[in-house]
Image: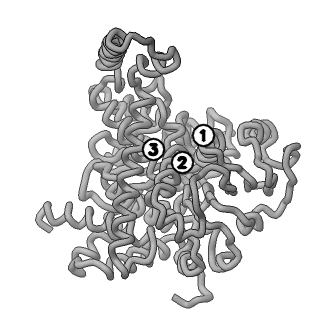
Amino acid sequence: MNAHIEPTFRESVNMMFDKAINLMDISPGLASKIKVCNSTYTVRFGVKLRGDIHTFTGYRSVHSEHKEPVKGGIRFATSVNQDEVEALAALMTYKCALVEAPFGGSKGGLHIDPNEWEPDELEKITRRFAYELIKRDLIHPSQNVPAPDMGTGEREMAWIADQFRRMNTSEINADACVTGKPLNKGGIIGRVEATGRGVQYALQEFFRHADDVKTSGLSGSLNGKSVVVQGLGNVGYHAAHFLSTEDGCKITAVIERDGAVINDGGININDLQSHLQKTGGVKGFLDAEYTSNGSSILEKNCNILIPAAMEGVINLSNAKRIKANVIIEAANGPVTAGADEIINAAGTVIIPDMYANAGGVTVSYFEWVKNLSHIRFGRMQRRQQATSNHMLIEEMERLVGKPVSDSFKTKFFQGAGELELVRSGLEDTMCSAYQQMHKTWRSNDNIDSLRTAAYVLALTKVADSYRALGL
């Protein structure tokens, strides 16, 4: 790579793939099969809106079908193009393999600014896009299962699921055609918070590995660490909320589209979120200093930097000025391949996107399983578990002759409902995946980072799947 030429997002993904594959014992033919995107469908469709026909361009890319269905979000953004969608589909393959969600990788996108359209117009556009994909089995519970991404959410997933049901009236598993749906439409408790919660669990696990923490130049626990967040959307907000309210972190700056707000004493993230929803930006927030030059705040001194917006925000132009000890990639591809080398050389630890934001697909997997089983998690065992706990405490109190505190009883008698089970499954997934990455990183001198370790692990699992298929 020419040191002065910034690689595109797709080139970055391919470069990181090549770096990992060169450390592995995989035949060139199999490596090539894993790397290529199997297929990309481009659709151009018209919708009559505001008295005229408007034409939209959308994509659905399938990277790898080593496991089916394939899984990946649908984003609505003006940045959507074929290269981006194919790169994101590849990342989904590796992400699902890394956290052992039994899916291949896919991704979709519609080239649109959702803010330019009223909700009823957006519904027409979404349903028509979904129609074009559904009739080609590019949305299907057993073949291709989308989820929300940038510019989409529960509302859009409900429209897509309803469109699928209209076109497949006898499909008993219709709800499983997409994930990230509203609760009353087959969604799962904990899906909205899932990616941000996964970022929290990833950081908690990082701080349990003293040698990794030492590499970053930090010590101790998450408590008191300074955090800069870029992007206060669903992921950035939940990550910041959980880290500040549960782990004692200080959110010292938040970067949004209209600039950034800074307060070294800590920003109340819920107050800022309310302000953002009311005004559409962070400007005018009373409890922090404002600057219109948001991107410069990526270079602010902090312990943890959470880029949770777009790809490529940390690149060759600013990599040398990044001062964070740890960067955790809550977005997809926020650090380019060129910047990655510079930042690693400077001693900053990057917790890679493939792992860091896998909370979303992990809980999407739980939702898909819930839809296929047609029963809410915890429904059959919660009361039985609570009754058993009651009996245990009563016998303990009888044997020792002393009562157990009421606060302990309340927690112990509760039993695990859907949210507790979802969080437990997500935490277990994030912890075990990090432990595998850590072991791979620390046991091989040729593996220089958590990102390379993540790629090596993911590619090993994908290669093993293909070999089992006889390839």
Disc nearer the start of the sequence (3/1): 3
Q: Nearer the viewer, residue 74 or 168?
A: 74
Disc 3 vs disc 2: Cβ atoms closer than 8 Å? no
Question: Does residue 51 show up?
Answer: no
Report x, y in % for residue 54. Answer: 61, 49
Residue at 26 percent across and 62 percent down: it is 461
Query: Is disc 1 placed on a helix, strand or loop?
Result: helix
The label number, if any, that marks residue 147 in the structure image:
3
Disc nearer the start of the sequence (1/2): 2
Q: Nearer the viewer, residue 248 or 316?
A: 248
Does 37 sit left or right of 469 as displayed? right
Query: Is disc 2 placed on a helix, strand or loop?
Result: helix
Q: Which residue position is annotated with label 1?
A: 246
Where residue 343 sits, quadrant-wise, is bottom right
Question: Taking 244 as reference, is 290 above or below it?
Answer: below
Distance between mark 1 and mark 2 Cα atoms: 9 Å
Farthest residue to the bottom: give it.
Answer: 2
Residue at 45 percent across and 16 percent down: it is 404
Distance between mark 3 and mark 1 Cα atoms: 28 Å
Does 295 sit left or right of 72 as displayed? right
Q: Which residue position is annotated with label 2?
A: 200
Report x, y in % for residue 38. Answer: 31, 64
Where residue 469 sits, quadrant-wise, is bottom left
Report x, y in % for residue 339. Answer: 58, 77
Farthest residue to the left: give it.
Answer: 470
